Amino acid sequence: ETGVTQTPRHLVMGMTNKKSLKCEQHLGHNAMYWYKQSAKKPLELMFVYSLEERVENNSVPSRFSPECPNSSHLFLHLHTLQPEDSALYLCASSQDSPSGVAKNIQYFGAGTRLSVL
Amino acid sequence: GQQVMQIPQYQHVQEGEDFTTYCNSSTTLSNIQWYKQRPGGHPVFLIQLVKSGEVKKQKRLTFQFGEAKKNSSLHITATQTTDVGTYFCAGREGGSEKLVFGKGTKLTVNP
């Protein structure tokens, strides 16, 4: 148990569905991240939130929409996904200074295995 | 932008053999981290190196940071089946705030 909980663990959705991934961290950290892990790109950073503000958006398609209501919770809203979006989606958190996002150790959740049909 | 290259992509060894994975950056790094991901699991932090030429050991694992702070290596002595997994390096360019992961080295160990 890393202190970062992701739900659901597995998700199957059609291309017209709307779903959300949830991440919760119990470590008191102030930065949270979404990563996509697939065979082609093992660990691809998608979004970074520091002190609940989005500070990084790595050219992710608009069909992925993140939300960070507070420093402990992070969501990834999904809509009209494509089959190539099937992957393991990992959430991570860290404790960073406001000027030093993603500086420190990343604590990963177990991930959500997403299949898009 | 910053790139972190990791080799080899795959490594298969017999139990008891040594294993090394190498990480190279296109730019000077302020620090480098190593993570291990077991099959079906998630990445778990192993260690962080900060100083030029730094060497750290964790039991059978030896981590090195190059003098120029552009490369790093992880060496496992006498591998065991519990070492199976993918090892990732992650580096941060000096002046940048983003952590960039290498593609990882997948280690399999034959008992």
Image (cartoon, coloured by chain):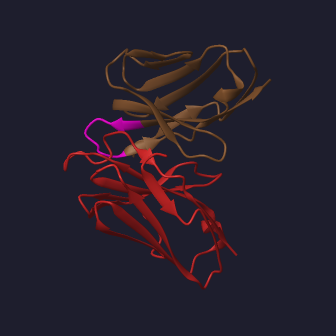
Please say whether residue B27 is one of the residues in the magenta stretch.
Answer: no
Residue A108 shows in the view: yes
Q: Where's residue B7, x and y in %?
A: 60, 31
Query: Which residue is outermost to the left?
Result: A98
| In this rendering, position of residue A89 left or right of residue B16 | left
| In this rendering, position of residue A115 left or right of residue B56 | right
Above/below status of A26 relative to A16: above
Residue visible at 45% across and 41% down in the picture: B3
Above/below status of A40 relative to A22: above
Residue visible at 33% across and 49% down in the picture: A27
Q: Which of the 4 image quarters holds residue A56?
A: bottom left
Residue B28 shows in the view: no
Residue visible at 66% across and 28% down in the picture: B82
Please say whether residue B96 is one of the residues in the magenta stretch.
Answer: yes
Residue visible at 44% across and 37% down in the picture: B90
Which SS does the magenta portion mostly show?
Answer: loop
Above/below status of B90 relative to A3: above
Chain that is brown in the image:
B
| Front residue of this view, candidates A101 and B4 | A101
Quarter of the rendering occupied by the C terminus of chain B:
top right
Q: Where's residue B101, x and y in %?
A: 47, 42
Q: Where's residue B48, x and y in %?
A: 39, 28
Q: Which residues are magenta?
A: B91-98
Q: Where's residue A67, x and y in %?
A: 36, 71
| In this rendering, position of residue B56 left or right of residue B107 | left
Chain A, chosen colour in render? red
